[in-house]
Image: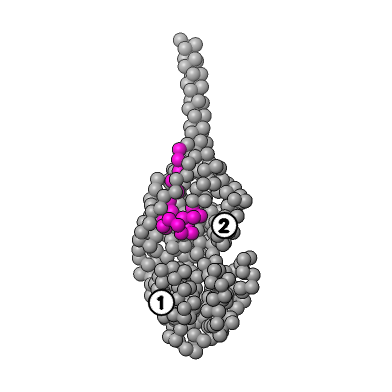
Amino acid sequence: MLRRRTFGRVAGMVLGGFALLAAGAAQAEWPERPITLIVPWGAGGGTDATGRMIGSLLEKELGQPVNVVNRTGGSGVVGHSAIANAKPDGYTLGVITVEVGMMHWAGLTDLDHMSYTPIALYNADPAGLQVRADSPYQSAAEVIDAIKANPGKYKGSGTGQGGIWHLALAGMLNDAGIEPAAVPWVPSKGAAAGLQELAAGGVDFVTCSVVEAAALIDAGKVRSLAIMGDERLGAFPDVPTLKESADLDWKLAAWRGLAGPKGLPEEVTGKLVPAFEKVWNSAEFQKFMEGRGFGLVWKPEAEFATWMSESDAGLGSVMKAVGLAK
């Protein structure tokens, strides 16, 4: 009887050990099936292009298919909600964008940056202040002075009402102590349309990324006076920062990052973050981003969380100033 009991205890310990090993192996095997990568904006745009490149390269690192799915609508709410509301098991990830710090201020959703598990920020494109090539203004300071002297005379454009580039102009004016309404905003279907209107003389200023204005800058139709970032861009070394040009501290960038729903287990993030860092550092990804003119920024997990928090606070302040916050 003693031998049977001893054998039973030993067998139980062995089986228990196998169970623990099996559980550990199961955790270590993530991912063991395809991953869905949600892009909250339409096919063909910059977020879609970067998301598909990331998906393609992550497949090689993780050894599983990464299927990119566009979930559009609601000014970004539909796709961002799909990411935040997914099961936090690592099989649904997404590209989140600067709009996650705008939508809740506008009363469109309760989601904010705290609704996600940040993986890493991979791109940021600071806003720039663009004028026509024949504009008399040679600096952002001259533009600020002209607006102060003639409120209501000049028009701005670059995106829809309340969009990221509208907030770029409003924030610049607010930081300069000027009522944002002093420059009436002409809504456009994106930066390209706004820049064409600028070149045609329909508006006086366009605030959008310098990358988006590059073609018209190269064509000699548009000039960029300043960028709303911490430092000059490598691709545009002659364009000063807003701080340099007008002694204003206002900064704003359109950004993109990889994230998952809140509560991703450490077993997932511990493998995903270094895999994504390898993707970001790869020659293929760097060449792709530089070729498209996208700003390369790397801020993993906690740094990305801090970035989002600061972006959220800045956007909220400006949206309140222009009456867009609910």
Q: Which residue lies under the disc numbered 2?
A: 289
Residue 286 is one of the magenta-drawn residues: no
Q: Which residue lies under the disc numbered 1?
A: 186
Numbered range of the magenta stretch:
33-51
- Position of residue 138 in the picture relative to residue 78 (left or right): right
Kindly identify the residue that appears in the image at 46 percent across and 55 percent down: 48
**Labels 2 and 1 touching (C-beta < 8 A):** no
Disc 1 secondary structure class: strand
Q: Position of residue 92 (x, y in %)?
A: 43, 46
- The residue under label 1 is which amino acid type? Val
Which residue is outermost to the bottom?
Answer: 149
Kindly identify the residue that appears in the image at 52 percent across and 36 percent down: 28
- Tell me if I can see residue 168 in this picture: no
- Position of residue 113 in the picture relative to residue 61 (left or right): left
Colouring chosen for the image of the structure? one colour
Kindly identify the residue that appears in the image at 46 percent across and 83 percent down: 154
Give the answer, above or below, for where 63 lies relative to 103.
Answer: above
Quadrant of the rendering where the C terminus is positioned: bottom left
Kindly identify the residue that appears in the image at 64 percent across and 70 percent down: 237
Give the answer, above or below, for where 323 lies relative to 313.
Answer: below
- The residue under label 2 is which amino acid type? Met
Q: Please tell me how crowded label 1 is: few (under 14), some (14-19), or many (20+) other residues with Cα within 10 Å.
A: some
